[in-house]
């Protein structure tokens, strides 16, 4: 009896914790407010469990209890990008760099919960749940955005180059790498055309240059223009109003960037320098001073142009051109309906199961129903703690695990009935039921967990990722079920029998016989 | 006592008829459509657009024209839901991101699209091939796991080979029936075999074998307990003892599945329907196929009489 009460306390505590976690906006934190606002921890999280026992702003226990939903539920974008270069012409570090750059660009969109990860040796997976303008996002991700600071020394009629395509040695280098790639139709040409239309800051400049036209080489040498530094040398860039109330872009250099940019600008004061994005001259300011750490780009920018250019500077250039090999876009309100319907389905299913267990097994059925409720709450809490991304198949996996959760109890109760019919007393029958059914419960759960494991592995293929959501919730449900179906049900059943004294034991129909 | 196994020939006949019909359906699909199943873009690559227009104006022709411009004049175009909802689904070939954008812009020119209620999925052939490879791998590993499970379950039992073969025949029975249902749905409702179908299939195999193992366990348990009885009677008794458990378990899963099919979203319904069919045939086959097969084997019914040349020795063991 002691043992059962002890288990009851454990179960009640676990359940109470799980209920609290599964409620929306779970937050408990003793981390001082002054620990936030730094670069690493800009904002105090509004959800989660955070403890900092020694007040050193180093969180000792940190759990982000937040329910993450999949694209099919909250809408958004998922793209799988593949490096558009022959294998071997770049390293895994290059790919990691490209991925970091994509991550920076994606973060500049201000989407929460964005996922950017390298997959295999040549791919990057980007998931942007909740993004409202997927097209803009793809543009931003895919844009190669080769940003160059180009030596224009000696060029006199600078303004006629603005908005035109020029040829630089950096472009020649990346073009060589590209030509080695398999000749395949690529959207690069279109991207350049769009870039031309967007990034022309000067209204006086004639309409966008046709893309087919090759860039203009340096008229003084007949060779490509010399690229001083690429966007990789930039630390940061921001749009701001200057003294004359004009929009300008303030930029900072990295130390590597400064090491190149400082000496060059120092030796070319008074000469023009071109800022070139994807071959198109954006502006060609005159160098005013030696720039070792940063500077300001002025031009006839309006606010939007300045902010766009700053964003393009900030997000850096992708070292590897990326091609979309699969994509999924889901409208923001589309999934909500399905979720509501799934919740509806879940509630109806659970109510029917509860009623069925109560009618069919009476008092043991009551114990199983309580255990099932504990099971559901524990699952919901685990979804937030692990965290498990809820997609529609994941919800189905959970609902089916609810269906199979009572399977264990049914095995036990059927055994119990047989023992009671064979004339055993209630206490013995209950114990026998649990002991004898255990191997069957274990075997059937293990075989389904094995199937889930296969499905989970299958779901690791990017094209079949829906499957892993199903497999994870199903497997989690089966594991929790081993606890609730056996321990929780047994505890509840023994305590109900004890509390009712002999009222239940004397009436075998109450035991479902 | 009601004797299930005595009517075993009826059950065989029923299952064989259903399977034969299923094979006919699959062959019909193979002849008329060129494939037994419609493969989804998960495996084949391609694109699916689910479009929601905010007002009237789009019809099959105008949508086809747009896709035709991009070399996709054979796209499958279907209206979804009520005509007043202006919802359409288009199954086309794979489009690069820029091409996809032009398609959506052109569609938007026919009638304004509501992007928040539209969705699209584009899968290139490369990704489709990978999913196909992973699927084949998953099926092979699944077969290995299920076979090991059967071998482990019957490792120390006399006639283990017999039990194992009967369990596998019941499993193949379920696979054939579910595949036939999928083929039929492909012919009538354009259902496609996707990654979730394969998921349902593996689950069906798992459940089917589990059910059979529970039943066979009970038969083994009952043989030493009722030594005087004939094999047929013992088997029959075991079925009746476990049928309650099998049905009750299945019923609780069915409740959830029926609820999902009634209230759940469209994409999930096909998956749950296939799972549901698989569970029904899985329960049926363990009781009405696997167990009767054991009895047939024991009694040397055709074709088991061909398996051994010494029936006298075998029946003496029983």
Image: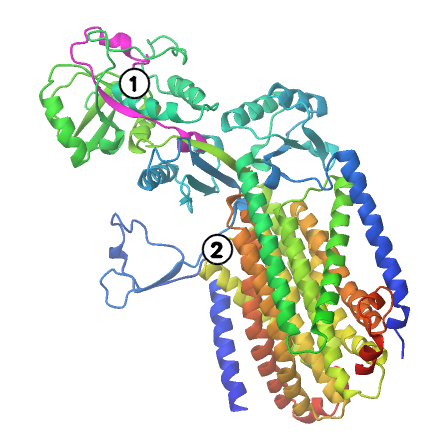
Q: Nearer the viewer, residue A378 or A95?
A: A95
Q: Secondary structure at mark 2?
A: loop
Q: Secondary structure at mark 1?
A: strand
* Above/below status of B308 relative to A241: below
Q: Report the residue at 53% width, 48% height from top.
A: A465
Taking the image as shown, residue B81 lies to the left or right of residue A84, namely right
The residue pinned by badge 1 equals A282
Q: Is residue A155 visible?
A: yes
Q: Is residue A510 visible?
A: no
Q: Chain of mark 1?
A: A
The residue pinned by badge 2 equals A67
Q: Quadrant of the C terminus of chain B?
A: bottom right
Q: Is residue A135 located in the magenta-colored stretch of the structure?
A: no
Using the rendered view, name the quadrant where residue A395 is placed.
Answer: bottom right
Q: Position of residue A245 (x, y in %)?
A: 23, 22
* Above/below status of A327 relative to B272: above
Using the rendered view, name the quadrant where residue A45 is placed.
Answer: bottom left
Q: Quadrant of the N terminus of chain B?
A: bottom right
Q: Which residue is most to the front? A: B309
Using the rendered view, name the quadrant where residue B267 is placed.
Answer: top right
What number of labels is visible? Answer: 2
Q: Position of residue A114 (x, y in %)?
A: 42, 44
Q: Report the residue at 77% width, 83% height from top.
A: B223
Which residues lie in the magenta part? Answer: A138-167
Taking the image as shown, residue A311 lies to the left or right of residue A347, namely left
Protein image colouring: rainbow
């Amino acid at each position: 009896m002691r043992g059962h009460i002890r288990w009851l306390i454990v179960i009640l505590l676990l359940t109470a914790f799980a209920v609290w976690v599964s409620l929306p906006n779970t937050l408990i934190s003793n981390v001082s407010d002054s620990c936030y606002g730094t670069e690493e921890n800009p904002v105090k999280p509004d959800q989660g469990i955070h403890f900092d026992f020694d007040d050193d702003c180093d969180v000792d226990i940190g759990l982000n209890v937040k329910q993450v939903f999949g694209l099919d539920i909250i809408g958004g974008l998922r793209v799988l990008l593949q490096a558009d270069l022959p294998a071997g012409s770049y390293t895994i570090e290059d790919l990691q760099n490209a991925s970091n750059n994509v991550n920076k660009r994606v973060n500049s969109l201000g989407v929460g919960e964005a996922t950017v990860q390298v997959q295999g040796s040549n791919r990057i997976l980007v998931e942007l749940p909740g993004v409202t303008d997927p097209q803009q996002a793809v543009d931003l991700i895919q844009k190669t955005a080769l940003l160059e600071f180009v030596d224009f020394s000696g060029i006199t009629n600078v303004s006629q180059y603005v908005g035109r395509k020029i040829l630089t040695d950096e472009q020649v280098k990346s073009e060589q790498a590209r030509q080695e790639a398999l000749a395949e139709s690529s959207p690069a040409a279109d991207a350049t055309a769009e870039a031309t239309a967007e990034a022309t800051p000067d209204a006086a400049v004639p309409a966008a240059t046709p893309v087919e036209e090759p860039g203009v080489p340096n008229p003084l040498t007949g060779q490509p223009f010399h690229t001083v530094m690429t966007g990789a040398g930039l630390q940061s860039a921001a749009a701001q109003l200057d003294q004359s109330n004009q929009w300008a872009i303030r930029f900072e250099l990295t130390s590597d960037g400064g090491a190149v940019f400082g000496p060059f600008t120092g030796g070319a004061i008074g000469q023009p320098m071109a800022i070139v994005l994807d071959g198109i001259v954006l502006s060609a300011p005159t160098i005013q001073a030696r720039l070792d750490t940063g500077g300001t780009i002025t031009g006839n920018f309006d606010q939007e142009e300045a902010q766009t250019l700053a964003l393009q500077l900030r997000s850096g250039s992708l070292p590897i051109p990326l091609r979309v090999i699969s994509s999924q876009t889901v409208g923001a309100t589309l999934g909500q309906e399905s979720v509501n319907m799934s919740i509806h389905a879940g509630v109806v299913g659970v109510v029917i199961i509860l009623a069925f267990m109560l009618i069919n097994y009476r008092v043991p059925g009551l114990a199983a129903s309580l255990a099932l409720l504990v099971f559901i709450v524990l699952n919901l809490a685990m979804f937030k703690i692990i965290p498990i991304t809820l997609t529609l198949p994941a919800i189905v996996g959970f609902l089916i695990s609810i269906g199979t959760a009572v399977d264990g109890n049914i095995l036990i109760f059927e055994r119990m009935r047989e023992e009671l019919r064979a004339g055993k007393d209630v206490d013995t029958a209950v114990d026998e039921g649990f002991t004898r059914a255990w191997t069957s419960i274990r075997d059937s759960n293990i075989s389904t967990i094995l199937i889930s494991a296969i499905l989970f592995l299958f779901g690791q293929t990017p094209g079949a990722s829906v499957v892993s959501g199903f497999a994870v919730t199903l497997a989690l449900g089966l594991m929790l079920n081993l606890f609730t179906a056996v321990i929780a049900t047994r505890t509840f059943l023994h305590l109900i029998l004890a509390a009712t004294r002999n009222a239940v034991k004397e009436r075998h129909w109450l035991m479902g016989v | 006592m009601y004797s299930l196994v005595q009517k075993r020939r009826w059950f065989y006949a029923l299952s064989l008829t259903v399977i034969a019909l299923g094979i006919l359906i699959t062959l019909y699909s193979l002849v008329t459509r060129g494939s037994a199943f419609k493969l989804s873009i998960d495996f084949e690559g391609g694109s699916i657009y689910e479009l929601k227009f905010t007002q009237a104006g789009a019809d099959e022709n105008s949508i086809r024209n747009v896709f035709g411009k991009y070399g996709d004049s054979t796209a499958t175009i279907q209206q979804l839901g009520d005509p007043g909802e202006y919802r359409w689904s288009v199954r086309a070939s794979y489009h690069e991101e820029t091409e996809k954008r032009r398609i959506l812009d052109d569609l938007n020119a026919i009638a304004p699209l509501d992007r928040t209620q539209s969705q699209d999925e584009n899968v290139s052939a490369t990704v489709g091939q990978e999913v196909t490879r992973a699927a084949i791998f998953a099926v092979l590993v699944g077969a290995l796991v299920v076979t090991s499970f059967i071998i482990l379950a019957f490792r120390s039992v006399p006639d283990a080979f017999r039990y194992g073969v009967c369990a596998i025949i019941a499993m193949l029975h379920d696979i054939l029936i579910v595949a036939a249902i999928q083929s039929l749905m492909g012919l009538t409702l354009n259902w496609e075999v996707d990654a979730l179908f394969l998921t349902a299939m593996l689950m069906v195999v798992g459940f089917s074998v589990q059910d059979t193992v529970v039943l066979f366990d009970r038969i083994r348990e009952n043989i030493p307990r009722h030594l005087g009885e004939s094999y047929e009677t013992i088997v029959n008794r075991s079925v009746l003892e476990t049928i309650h458990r099998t049905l009750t378990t299945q019923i609780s899963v069915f409740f959830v599945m029926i609820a999902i099919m009634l209230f759940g979203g469209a994409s999930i319904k096909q998956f749950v329907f296939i799972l549901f069919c698989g569970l029904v045939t899985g329960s049926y086959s363990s009781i009405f196929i696997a167990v009767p097969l054991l009895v047939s084997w024991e009694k040397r019914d055709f074709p088991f009489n061909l398996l051994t040349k010494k029936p006298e020795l075998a029946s003496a063991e029983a």
